[in-house]
Image (spheres, helix red, strand yellow):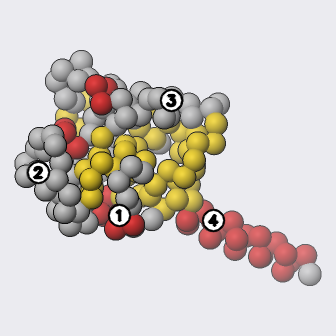
Amino acid sequence: MIFIVVAALVAVLWVLRKRYMVVTVRGYSMRPSYLPGDKVLVRRIAAARIRRGQAVVFEAPGRTGEGAVAEAAPGRTGEGTAAPVPPGSFVVDVGLLIKRAVATGGDQVDFPVPGAGPVVPAGHLAVRGDNVDESFDSRDFGYVPPERVVGVVLRRLGAP
């Protein structure tokens, strides 16, 4: 009997782990919504289900397995050089970023996107940080392709 209960508990925990994750916030680009040290609950969903206004977690551009390498945006981050994580970016755990979805496939954006036109391609997302002056986002790395989307933030769990 106890074996059945333990097996059921393990199965439930495995399912929850596949569907949800908790990440810790580092950086200030989503201030005031989220601050460094906040823990957020993320539900894994496909990019096609994301709506404008949701906080999105996605794999950082340039990720090659062990973290992110991205070009820092001169003037916005204060660095202007390549860095593992540009100052001012809002990073959750290794190789992930969190930003606000501001446009989805077919929407037009009102800011320049490197290497792309003003209309978001189908399945892709345009993202920006809530604190736009300190954010490394679609203005720097372009649209987020659907295969890089991890999920959406459901809620803040608290600070350390």
Q: Residue at x 57, y 59 (%)?
A: 20
Q: Which residue is mark 3?
A: 35
Dot 1 falls on a residue whose secondary structure is helix
Nearest to viewer (mark 2 / mark 1) = 2
Nearest to viewer (mark 4 / mark 1) = 1
Front one among 11 and 16:
16
The answer to whether residue 141 is seen in the rendering is no
Q: Which residue is mark 1?
A: 47
Nearest to viewer (mark 2 / mark 3) = 2
CA separation in Å, label 2 and label 4: 38 Å
- Give the class, few, some or many, for how many residues have Cα within 10 Å of label 1's Cα (few <14, many ≥20): many
- Residue 72 lies left or right of residue 159; in this view the side is left
CA separation in Å, label 2 and label 1: 19 Å
The amino acid sitting under disc 2 is Pro
Among the 4 quarters of the image, the one containing residue 151: bottom left
- Residue 40 lies left or right of residue 76; in this view the side is right
- Tell me the tag on residue 158: none
Dot 3 falls on a residue whose secondary structure is loop
Q: Which residue is mark 2?
A: 118
Q: Which residue is mark 4?
A: 16
Q: How many marks?
A: 4
Q: Residue at x 47, y 42 (%)?
A: 93
The amino acid sitting under disc 3 is Leu
Residue 138: % across, % down: 22, 43
Q: Residue at x 58, y 42 (%)?
A: 156
The amino acid sitting under disc 1 is Ala
